[in-house]
Image: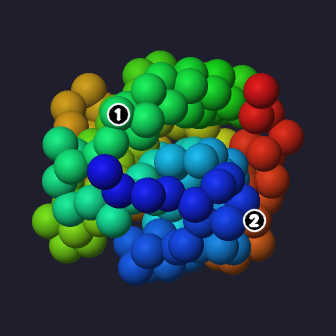
Amino acid sequence: MISVPPSGTAILNPTMRKFGAPETIIHQFQYWIVMLRPIQLTLGSLVLAAHEPARSFSQLGQESFTELHKVTGQLESALAKAFNYDKLNYLMLMMVDPDVHFHVVPRYVESRYFNGLEFIDSGWPGPADFNKATKTDADTNRLIREHLISCWP
């Protein structure tokens, strides 16, 4: 069984750091961390990463799976309150970044606006389009992150 440090003291793995942690952290749990995805595929795109040093989903301990229920409930509630998404995709790709993580992509039938920018879900109703993201700057990403934190249950 893999040991995980108590909440608040978790070590950030390379995947978490690639996605901007600690600056992008929205909420940290004992076994999982929720971060704003620096490249916004759609408004509110997140990365949900496991603290355990696992390279496949099945390597996670039972506690991670148990906590995942709580994490997804809070994450979905915050995104719904913040941006009123139409669907939510959890994509576990792990092709480039091998640590266990999901790309959480809110999906929208119609454009959303935030901080003067239009966010278009160009892949709707098909798969999320990783080649077409809304260009955001550090200030916009900070504001999206702060808004999600304020909406966290």
Query: Viewed as shown, does residue 20 lie left or right of 3?
Result: right
User: Are the residues flagged by discs 1 and 2 in contact, CB closer than 8 Å?
Assistant: no
Query: Residue visible at 26% across and 27% down?
Result: 125
Judged from the image, the secondary structure of the residue bearing numbered disc 2 is helix
Query: Residue visible at 66% across and 61% down?
Result: 25
Residue that carries the numbered disc 2 in the rendered image: 142
Nearest the camera: 122 or 27?
27
Other-residue count near label 2 (Cα within 10 Å), few / some / many at <14 / 14–19 / ≥20: some
Query: Viewed as shown, does residue 116 lie left or right of 4?
Result: right
Query: Residue visible at 80% across and 53% down?
Result: 146
Judged from the image, the secondary structure of the residue bearing numbered disc 1 is helix
Other-residue count near label 1 (Cα within 10 Å), few / some / many at <14 / 14–19 / ≥20: few
Residue found at the far right of this picture: 150
Residue 71 in which image quadrant: top right
Between disc 1 and disc 2, whose residue precedes?
Answer: 1
**Residue 122 image offset from top left, x and y in percent:** 33, 44
Nearest the camera: 86 or 119?
86
Residue that carries the numbered disc 1 in the rendered image: 62
Q: Amino acid at mark 2?
A: Arg
Q: Amino acid at mark 1?
A: Gln
